[in-house]
Amino acid sequence: MTLPGEQTVATGLTQTEIAYSVLRREIMSCKVMPGTKLRINELAPRLGVSVSAVREALSRLSMEELVVATAQKGFSVSSLSAGEIKDITRTRISIETLSLIDSLKNGNVEWESRVIAAFHTLSRTPYGHPEADEAANEQWSRAHAAFHTALVSACTSRSLLKIRASLYDQSERYRQLSGLVPRRDNRDVEAEHKGLMEAALARDEALISRLIDDHLSRTMNLIVKAF
């Protein structure tokens, strides 16, 4: 929706959509750190959009719990804590498991092809490092998200998928902040992803339930250590 006085730029996106996209990317990658005050009058000229567009974008991000709106104090980036990532992960394991099982029950040949293709892309995308440029790290993050999304893409519950997407985004901020893009232990992440793919294709609900629990718990434990 275009706000009063808001113009659509050459990209076809409104100013609000531009502000939302840029700010969301910066928050998710922790380029803008948790707890940072988001001053509308400073963001508008930096992003090249109107004040009203920034305000609307921040309101949308607030609904996603990436931004906190405080009366009389304005907006700030949501804070992070070790306790919260434990809670997010426990909930995410439950939702992810339900989504996966439904996806395994309903997946067809096209779904299998999506899963295989997504794994192939992920396995061919280099694992990022802190010294790598932002584009290299973002490329792996996108491939990683696409693989996990492909696994649940045959799930028939829109509500489950909506909750799952929100939990994924929240946990991704923790992974980015803790520096878990680089390999910090002897963990074979590719083997974990391959196991998930094979369990999905075999329609083995019990196995994939155990594997996703282990996969997400390992990441959570590393994040907690980083805290």
Image (tube, grey):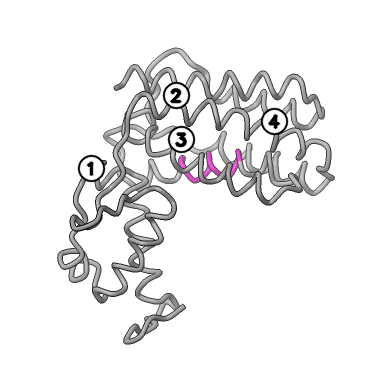
Mark 2 vs mark 3: give the one in front: 2
Q: Main secondary structure of the magenta part?
A: helix
| Region of the chain picked out in magenta, as a range | 141-148
Q: Secondary structure at mark 1?
A: loop
Label 1 sits on residue: 35
Label 2 sits on residue: 86
Spatial CA span between label 2 and label 3: 28 Å
> Crowding near pointer 3: few (<14 within 10 Å), some, many (20+)?
few
Label 4 sits on residue: 197
Q: Position of residue 99 (x, y in %)?
A: 69, 38
Spatial CA span between label 2 and label 1: 19 Å
Mark 2 vs 1, N-terminal side = 1
Q: Position of residue 47 (x, y in %)?
A: 25, 67
Residue in view at x 40 percent, y 48 percent: 65
Spatial CA span between label 2 and label 4: 25 Å
Q: Is residue 48 above or below residue 162?
A: below
Name, please, the residue furthest toward the top: 186
Q: Secondary structure at mark 4?
A: helix
Q: Do callouts 2 and 3 mark residues in contact (Cβ within 8 Å)?
A: no
- Residue 126 drawn in magenta: no
Label 3 sits on residue: 126
